[in-house]
Amino acid sequence: MRPVKIASTGAHLPGEPLSNADLERLCGPLPPDILEGIQVQTRHWMVDPETGEHRETNSEMATAAGRQALERAGVDASEVDLLIISTASPDFPLPPMATLVQDALGLRRCTSLEVRSGCAGAVEALDIARSYIERGSHSTALVIGSEAISPLLVPVFQDVEPEKIRMRDRIGLYTFGDGAGAILLQAADPSETRGVIAASSACVGGGQKPGMQIVGGGTHMSLRRQFAAKRPVDLRVDVSASATQTPAVIAEALTDLLEAGGLQASDVAACILPEGNAGYLTDELAEAGIDMTHWDGLAGRVMENLSEVGATGSAAVPLALDHAWATGRLSPGDLVMLLAIETSKWKFAGMILPWTVAA
């Protein structure tokens, strides 16, 4: 099998940063301890928070991130023969958003796939892309994670007095952001790189209630009943379950991934895990009574940018990876672990591979 390499990354964040002070004016404050737990300082929304109008679409964000990845690598869009998008918030149910991005990039023909998922989706898409390249059927894959969550957030506070907004609804407003991140994969010569060393993914929430749901716009009940609801499309987050169950999912994901690669945590130079401050996570894992061996081995190597962009679903891992590269925290040859945790139905997806992009 041919090995794959990361040729470049790209990112796109819509609009100007929206601060916690901005949100306090729009929807009221959060208690300091809750705000500290969320850890988000700024986020970007594709929706104008003042008017509720969309300034761009999800597919446009994805296209912008993809174009940046191509430009950085000096690769023409016509060379892309595989395009995979991950999102939980597409422009339309059909056609797949991947085909809209394909059009925007000017590609008449390419293999175009879409993964419908949240945080874990981009790494799942990356695993699919590398299998196409490894088997020799494709050579250049553009993988994009893109999410537009603000259209579900603005109706919570629009035309509502801040003091009338429930605290549990405010938490979501402060937590989430929009954005897109792209990763460009190419076939490589075996002398260049080892390629993907390990990958692992699973849904470990069998028999459990979802930790996050977007309800509405689907086929779970008649459209007439959906339109009669206070919010025809509603984002529902079980904050308590997310806090208590996420550490266990992280521990299981980390163990599975390292075992798949026959590695120790200390072998990894960088862990891209967009779940917040690593010290905060350490406390949560310890309180959950989880074996800390692998986690302790990653001390000082966890990289994320949650405080700057918020929780961005499918975009989280590629945005954090792009941030780590752009800030000079990755060097060619570094073993990079990508680890995505998704609370929708308690999923994870991970990958370990060498970093192959020059500074």
Image: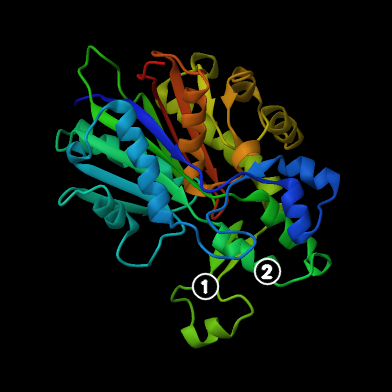
Depth check, mark 2 against mark 1: the one in front is 2
What's under tag 2, amino acid-wise?
Gln
Q: Position of residue 288 (x, y in %)?
A: 73, 37
As drawn, 18 above or below 356: below
Task: Name the image colouring.
Answer: rainbow
Residue 216 marker? 1
In the displayed orientation, state which residue is furthest to the bottom.
224
Q: Is residue 90 left or right of residue 161?
A: left
User: Within 10 Å of the Cα at label 1, are there few (<14), some (14-19), or many (20+) other Cα atoms?
Assistant: some
Q: Position of residue 219 (x, y in %)?
A: 43, 76
Q: Position of residue 277 (x, y in %)?
A: 68, 31
What's under tag 1, amino acid-wise?
Gly
User: Could you tell me which residue is drawn at 67 percent across and 58 percent down?
Assistant: 238
As drawn, 279 above or below 160: above
User: Within 10 Å of the Cα at label 2, are there few (<14), some (14-19), or many (20+) other Cα atoms?
Assistant: some
Q: Position of residue 134 (x, y in %)?
A: 21, 31
Residue closest to the eye, 79 or 254? 79
The C terminus lies in which quarter of the figure?
A: top left
The N terminus lies in which quarter of the figure?
A: top left
Check disc 2 and report its element: helix, strand or loop.
loop
Spatial separation of the CA atoms under disc 2 and disc 1? 19 Å
Q: Quadrant of residue 11?
A: top left
As drawn, 300 above or below 53: above
As drawn, 26 above or below 161: above
Q: How many marks?
A: 2
Check disc 1 and report its element: helix, strand or loop.
loop
Residue under numbered circle 2: 158
User: Could you tell me which residue is drawn at 43 percent across and 55 percent down?
Assistant: 58
Residue closest to the eye, 246 or 146? 146
Among the two numbered marks 2 and 1 on one chain, the one whose residue lies closer to the N terminus: 2
